[in-house]
Image (cartoon, grey):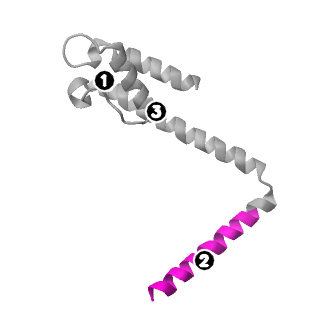
Amino acid sequence: MLGFAAAIAVGTALLMLPIARVGPGGASFVEALFTATSAVCVTGLIVVDTPVFWTGFGQVVILVRIQLGGLGIMIFAALIGVVLARKMSVRSRLNTAAEAKTLGSRTYAGSSAASS
């Protein structure tokens, strides 16, 4: 949670710099905050036309935020997977794997018979 907030805060500050925006001055606080938040949360929402409003620097800042947000989601998902895997006993894992294998072979057999 703190990592997302930090990424959004740094992104907002960088997007408010004059070098991040095409034309004079920097972006407003609301434009920068919304864009940084949207990028980190990987929603794709924008309040301004990205290629027109932001310079190459601003676009790189947005791209890095998107990558950080996506990486955060993948790390969180992997962490949940590890925690759940540790809670499962070896017997449960073997039963799950065997059941998945059995279901997979039934699906293939059923689909080949149906297509013949």
Q: Amino acid at mark 2?
A: Ser
Residue 6 x/y as whole percent: 51, 20
Q: Quadrant of the C terminus?
A: bottom left
Task: Please identify the residue farthest to the bottom as the structure is shown.
Answer: 116
Query: In the picture shown, does residue 60 fall above or below 105?
Result: above
Residue 5 x/y as whole percent: 52, 22
Magenta highlight range: 94-116
Q: Amino acid at mark 3?
A: Cys
Prevailing secondary structure of the magenta residues: helix
- How crowded pointer 3 is (Cα within 10 Å; few <14, some 14-19, many 20+) is rated as many
Q: Earlier in the sequence, mark 3 or mark 1?
A: 3
Q: Residue 105 — which label? A: 2
Given residues 47 and 91, the one toward you in this image is 47
The residue identified by callout 1 is: 58
Q: Earlier in the sequence, mark 2 or mark 3?
A: 3
Q: Amino acid at mark 1?
A: Gly
State left or right for residue 39 relative to residue 46: right
The residue identified by callout 3 is: 41
At mark 3, the secondary structure is loop
Image point 36% across, 28% down: which residue? Answer: 62
Image point 75% across, 48% down: which residue? Answer: 86
Q: CA distance from mark 2 to mark 1?
A: 51 Å
The magenta stretch spans residue 81: no
Q: Quadrant of the N terminus?
A: top right
